[in-house]
């Protein structure tokens, strides 16, 4: 409401009695309403209006953030809300607006760097846009669990869902959502069916492999991520394709599960191969375990074996030696996820397609030319 539309109740005028004793700001200090038993009752919009000396419509406009309310009047209403402990009914406001201003996020695990940092970025970006985030971790990656997570999100009333999971489970889970709920998928090749935001997995992998080949290594071994992971498979495919394109033979693939412990076990195996002079690990955590195993087996890094990772976690520069790695911009991935769901909600963006976030190589001390070069 602008000042020209103020109701008579909003117009300051002579005051008498209790209202005359009101402090600056206009809201008279009155005890909160109580029942006969002495318990406090929940303040209503009408209670706030009476205490502030304005209309209920003005209270509604202030609580919903409408522009045009006189600043002095707005302060009076806010002071009355605080005095009475009034909280706007978020469900009623959502029904009135036609949206809940909440984004749901479904993910399998919070134990991986990528998921945690992407979730952090989503929450930060959503808050900046005035949206809350509801998180539902899926304990076991099964179709039933995925269906259950979507059902819970529907009950919690969300406007959109960001999914950090393998898309084959999403497709197979026979999920039914209300028409207004928009979906964006992270790290997937499902751009033909969904709106997808992904790191340039292939581009980052090619840069890592090429860096090692340019240093003079004859080939590059690969410590890959777990089977069933889209990111792991994309990096493995790009590793093999880069070697084939360079006319080099691809050594046997060794897999881990993203953890440093699996990297350590794989490192013990790799250390037994005297012809292994360069290893591309699919993430930094596995690279950390690999470094430990090589050290224990007397293989020096980078003199005997060069090691490169993927992620550029904050601790990567503190590894011994500091780890050469591929930097992922998780903050940008999260920001673009939120932007994508908001554009879909506003019918401003495409229904399908993939947005790739560029990666960059970060050279450090864990890579060097092989000794024979």
Image (cartoon, helix red, strand yellow):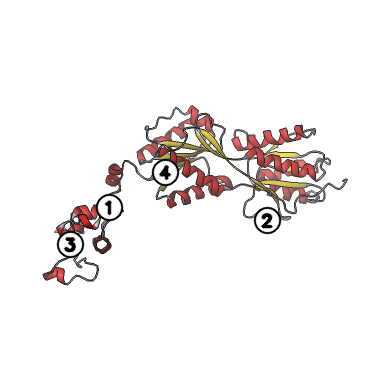
Which residue is at the far front?
Answer: 4
> In this orientation, which residue lies closer to the viewer: 343 or 317?
343
Q: Which mark is residue 270?
A: none
Sequence-wise first label, 2 or 4? 4
- Observer-nearest residue: 230 or 195? 195
The earlier-in-sequence mark between 4 and 3 is 3
Q: Nearer the viewer, mark 4 or mark 3?
A: 3
Q: In this figure, which residue is indicated by the disc labeled 4?
A: 103
Residue 101, position in %: x, y?
Answer: 37, 45
| Residue depicted at 82% across the width and 48% down the height | 369
Name the residue beneath numbered marker 3.
11
**How far separated are the C-alphas under marks 3 and 1?**
24 Å
Q: Nearer the viewer, mark 2 or mark 3?
A: 3
Question: Comparing marks 3 and 1, which lies closer to the viewer?
Answer: 3
CB under 8 Å between discs 4 and 1: no
Q: Which residue is mark 2?
A: 317
| Mark 4 neighbour class, 10 Å CA radius: few under 14, some 14 to 19, many 20 or more | many
Q: Say whether residue 229 is visible.
A: no
- Pick the front one: 123 or 113: 123
Q: CA distance from mark 2 to mark 4?
A: 34 Å
- Would residue 265 appear left or right of 347 to someone viewing this image? right
Q: Position of residue 219 (x, y in %)?
A: 79, 38
């Amino acid at each position: 409401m602008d000042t020209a539309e103020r109701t008579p109740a909003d117009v300051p005028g002579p005051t008498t009695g209790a209202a005359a004793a009101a402090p600056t700001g206009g809201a008279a200090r009155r005890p909160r309403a109580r029942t006969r038993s002495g318990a406090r009752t929940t303040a209503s919009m009408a209670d706030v209006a009476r205490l502030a000396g304005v209309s209920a419509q003005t209270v509604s406009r202030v609580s919903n953030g409408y522009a045009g309310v006189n600043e002095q009047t707005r302060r009076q209403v806010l002071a009355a809300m605080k005095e009475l402990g009034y909280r706007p009914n978020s469900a009623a406001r959502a029904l009135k607006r036609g949206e809940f201003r909440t984004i749901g996020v479904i993910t399998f695990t919070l134990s991986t760097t990528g998921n945690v940092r992407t979730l952090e970025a989503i929450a930060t970006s959503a808050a900046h846009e005035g949206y809350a985030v509801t998180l539902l971790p899926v304990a076991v990656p099964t179709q039933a669990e995925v269906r259950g997570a979507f059902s819970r999100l529907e009950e919690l009333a969300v406007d959109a869902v960001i999914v950090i999971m393998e898309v084959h489970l999403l497709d197979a889970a026979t999920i039914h959502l209300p028409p207004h709920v928009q979906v964006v998928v992270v790290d997937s090749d499902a751009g033909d069916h969904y709106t997808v935001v992904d790191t340039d997995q292939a581009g980052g992998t090619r840069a890592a492999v090429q860096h090692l080949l340019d240093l003079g290594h004859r080939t590059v071994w690969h410590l890959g991520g777990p089977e069933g992971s889209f990111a792991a498979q994309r990096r493995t495919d790009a590793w093999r394709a880069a070697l084939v394109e360079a006319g080099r033979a691809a050594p046997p693939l060794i897999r881990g599960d993203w953890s440093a412990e699996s990297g350590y076990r794989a490192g013990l195996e790799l250390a037994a191969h005297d012809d292994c002079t360069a290893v591309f690990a699919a993430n930094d955590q596995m690279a950390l375990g690999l470094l430990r195993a090589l050290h224990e087996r007397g293989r020096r890094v980078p003199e005997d074996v060069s090691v490169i990772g993927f992620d550029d976690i904050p601790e990567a520069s503190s590894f011994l030696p500091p780890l050469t790695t591929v930097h992922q911009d998780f903050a940008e991935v999260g920001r673009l996820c939120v932007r994508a769901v908001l554009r879909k909600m506003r019918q401003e963006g495409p229904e399908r397609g993939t947005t790739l976030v560029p990666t960059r190589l970060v050279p450090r001390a864990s890579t060097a030319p092989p000794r024979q070069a």
